[in-house]
Amino acid sequence: MTAKDNPSLWGFGTTKTFKIPVEHLDFKYIEKCSDVKHLEKILCVLRSGEEGYYPELTEFCEKRLKGLAPESRALRKDKPAATASSFTAEEWEKIDGDIKSWVSEIKKEENKIHCHETETFPAMDNNLPPVRGTNSRLHVTKEKYSNSRRPKKKIPRDYAEWDKFDVEKECSKIDEDYKEKAVVKNKSHLSKIETRIDTAGLTEKEKTSLATREKEKGNEAFNSGDYEEAIMYYTRSISVLPTVAAYNNRAQAELKLQNWNSAFWDCEKVLELEPGNLKALLRRATTYKHQNKLQEAIEDLNKVLNVEPDNELAKKTLLEVERDLKTDPASKTQTKGKRMVIQEVENSEDEDGKDRRRAQEDGSGDKSKTSFLFWLCKNLPFYMMSWLKFSVSTKILSPPDFF
Amino acid sequence: MSAFEKPQIIAHIQKGLNYTVFDCKWVPCSAKFVTMGNFARGTGVIQLYEIQHGDLKLLREIEKAKPIKCGTFGATSLQQRYLATGDFAGNLHIWNLEAPEIPVYSVKGHKEIINTIDGVGGLGIGEGAPEIVTGSRDGTVKVWDPRQKDDPVANMEPVQGENKRDCWTVAFGNAYNQEERVVCAGYDNGDIKLFDLRNMSLRWETNIKNGVCSLEFDRKDISMNKLVATSLEGKFHVFDMRTQHPTKGFASVSEKAHKSTVWQVRHLPQNRELFLTAGGAGSLHLWKYEYPVQRSKKDSEGVEMGVAGSVSLLQNVTLSTQPISSLDWSPDKRGLCICSSFDQMVRVLIVTKLHKI
């Protein structure tokens, strides 16, 4: 290789790949550089070793790049698989022991299934759904992605049929067809899943694993934000085998959807099966808080803090509940009577009423009377209606008895 | 995630074989697995191994007339655990590994090699009838029911006169109730087609420009959520299958990795957001998918369209210099998986710390 072939010897000063000036392969430059793409190129050149082997510079460049863009693809290194030597003796013991115990466990399980096989074999075949339709052929054309399938058009074959051909109607039909196709039902699956699973002929072990699988599906749906789907999978899991975990998780999903009542009942179920379950107590406290049963909420939270005094969530919720209790003790007592009757709507109305009263306290003296009257006139019809409902429900105005 | 919290991929057991191995699958509810391939003399082989005392013990070796390309346990019950295989001559067989002399079911399904096979409805996964789907070099994708002899239950083939493209991969999905099911097929020209088996119609198709090597739904037995498609040229795409736009189809995110063909993708059965990809340079990458804040949004005309999330690399290792042709996670033990590669090796891997993710 002569000097002619190697441009850097001429003093052109750039690398072969990427044409980076050689001055950039330097600690000071890399420290100051914040262009991620450029750093990636520098790292590539350093790693390839074509300008020489500089391990410390390479490491420095990697650190800098990690600081700027930890997800960068250039940081991916080929490395061999880990072996026993990559772990401490303790860790390796744990991993190895885990596998060994699993292997022996699963062998025992397998032997059990093997023994059962001859007994339960005939039962399985009868429960299967029928074979899908008749042999149906689906012709696939090599259409490009943008084309959509057009329905077959009845092309008129002679003059008589052409006379009957209504151009306007056909045009509007084509438009409609397109719109129909455009409506792709995206959430229809929720209604089509069975909420109860038929568990006929399943052993205990099978039921447990089925319930666990449904619960895992529910967990996955929860983690991706599909709370209704999560609730449905938890319901399915419970229909196979009711467990504390499934009820607890369903309560949490209901809380996310703000179904306070359903969440409450799920928490109750858990506490029936396992009194003192901390998660259930916490979640029940949250349902109490949102249903304005603040005293009960405080009780539950205190129970949790007795067992786990450092529970962050319990402490936070307790603070919020105590704050709620302090700010509006008046409204609590006033609205207790109405709450019995109008459960759905009253929350928002209450909020309104509270706000108005607060504004009143802050407002100037002169305006207070008029604003109070205004408020009364606005809310009076509502109070009348609610009183009417209340009285009807308690049979004050009962129909006269005929003797 | 700091280096200590990252999952580690451990090569626990490695075994050299004396034949080319194409596929390996765990036997459900056991510490056994099968490897399938062909001997140098041109015959097919299925071997059954069991993990014993930190090493592999060969329990059974079954030799058959034609080389075996792929297999699945997906359509069998937990009690029977029959293996369905596709071979180089286009035959689909279902074997009882305890009595492998005569197949339980056998049909000459295709005119050319069966490249890929998948099963659903067995093992307690997926509602509805157990079915097997095969994809072949003759361009057709056929769905079989082991209770129906000789004829497929559904047949997806190119129209007369069209060029047939090799089907390289198939996957079942959307099997959340007895009626619904979809089959997704990937072809060598980059086509991905989604067939709805309930309506017997083509629900969606797209082209990812490079041949599709492997397709998998994140879970077969839920309403289709995500689909990962891997291809040549080191790319893979993750499609969000929850929201279909009438013209734009499904939203996707793509990632470059492996610097060569991405041969396989397998989702962790215990957590659908984690998946492993296997590459042509003998490397394995473990990925995690994160959902966007909003999974769907309205486009300029007010029609719903999906929003794809992001994929991040958790760990990567290089196991060999030859492509890793097949991967399988154990359905019973989180983190245990097997992989086979073209250097005639089968490896048992342990991936740690997956429960913490």
Image (tube, rainbow, N blue to C red):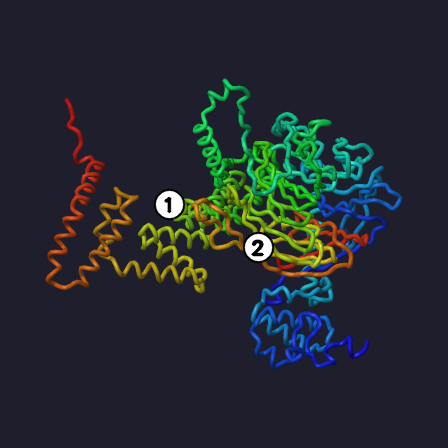
What amino acid does circle 1 point to? Asn
The quarter of the image holding the C terminus of chain A is: top left
Query: Mark 1 — on which chain does it sit?
Result: A
Query: Quick check: can you spot residue A82?
Result: yes
Looking at the image, which is closer to me, A149 or B237?
A149
Residue of label 2: B289
Query: Quick check: can you spot residue A111?
Result: no
User: Viewed as shown, does residue B89 lie left or right of A68?
Assistant: right
Residue B333 position within the rendered picture, expressed as x and y whole percent measured from the top left: 66, 50
User: CA gap, disc 1 to disc 2?
Assistant: 34 Å
Looking at the image, which is closer to me, B352 or A25?
A25
Residue B101 position within the rendered picture, expressed as x and y whole percent measured from the top left: 82, 34
Q: Residue at x 28, y 45 (%)?
A: A345
Looking at the image, which is closer to me, A297 or A50?
A50
The image's mark for residue A261 is 1
Other-residue count near label 1 (Cα within 10 Å), few / some / many at <14 / 14–19 / ≥20:
some
Query: Mark 2 — on which chain does it sit?
Result: B
Q: Quadrant of residue B234?
A: bottom right
Residue B343 position within the rendered picture, expressed as x and y whole percent measured from the top left: 81, 54
Depicted B294 relative to depicted A120: above or below? below
What amino acid does circle 2 point to? Tyr
Other-residue count near label 2 (Cα within 10 Å), few / some / many at <14 / 14–19 / ≥20:
some
Q: Residue furthest right?
A: B41
The quarter of the image holding the N terminus of chain A is: bottom right
Q: Are marks 1 and 2 in contact (CB under 8 Å)?
A: no
**SS for dot 1:** helix
Residue B140 position within the rendered picture, expressed as x and y whole percent measured from the top left: 70, 36
Q: Nearer the viewer, mark 1 or mark 2?
A: 2
**SS for dot 2:** strand
